[in-house]
Image (cartoon, rainbow, N blue to C red):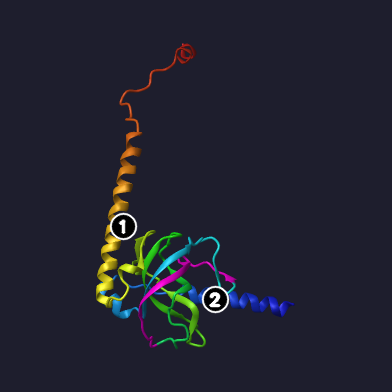
Amino acid sequence: MKSKTFLTIVLSLISGVSVLAYMVIEFPGWDRLQDISTDIFVARCSETPDPDNVTHYGHRVDFQGLYYANVEIVSVLKSGTNWIATRVCPPKPGLAWIQTAYCPQQGEYYLIFANPETDYYTQRQATNYWDATESFRFVPLGAHFSTNSIAGHPLNVQMQTLFKASAFHLEKQIQREQAQKQRIESGIQPQSTQMPQPKQNERASTN
């Protein structure tokens, strides 16, 4: 019993260390990001991740600001090779899990630049797990995106279509939030520059 408990603790620590030792890069530009991303696909977030309830290979782990996002891949734009990982599970339509600093929202579509997550010991890809650590690897497309707009087109045309769709979505979102901000500001009362006058009973108590 003690040995089993000890093994569980060791596995939890190993899992935690492997996650906490992640690296981030500065945004390299879209052309370079496309080159260094093994896989590029469009996915729909199945569930908004909860940062307070995260597990990794069955062990609860503090991801230090990272999420494990549950998504459904709906269209694969690029599926390449990786010099670290032996490909055992190239991206295909269906469920997948992505480690990222971005918190995707349930029901929303995203263009994702990812690399296969690799098992530290076997150097093989973890099945249906991808890494897209930096938040810029998630490009929001909104909740009403259709893959028909990119079907059958070459990668460069698909990328331009998706960037335009994202810019349109974000512009609409900014307009809605700006309108909401103005409504909220209209409810803020201006602060009085005069000192409040004491009430009658307050004057009596000071005499």
For the record, the magenta segment spans 59-83
Q: Main secondary structure of the magenta part?
A: strand
Residue 87, above or below 13: below
Label 2, residues with CA under 10 Å away: few <14, some 14-19, many ≥20? some
Secondary structure beneath label 2: helix
Residue beneath the point at 35% across and 33% down = 187
Residue beneath the point at 46% across and 14% down = 206
Is residue 190 within the magenta segment? no
* Quadrant of the frame with the N terminus: bottom right
Between marks 2 and 1, how big is the CA–CA gap?
A: 37 Å
Residue 108, above or below 29: above
Q: Which mark is residue 169?
A: 1
Residue 47, above or below 199: below
To which quarter of the image does residue 113 belong?
A: bottom left
Amino acid type at mark 2? Ser
To which quarter of the image does residue 146 belong?
A: bottom left
Instruction: Name the foreground residue: 53 vs 86.
Output: 86
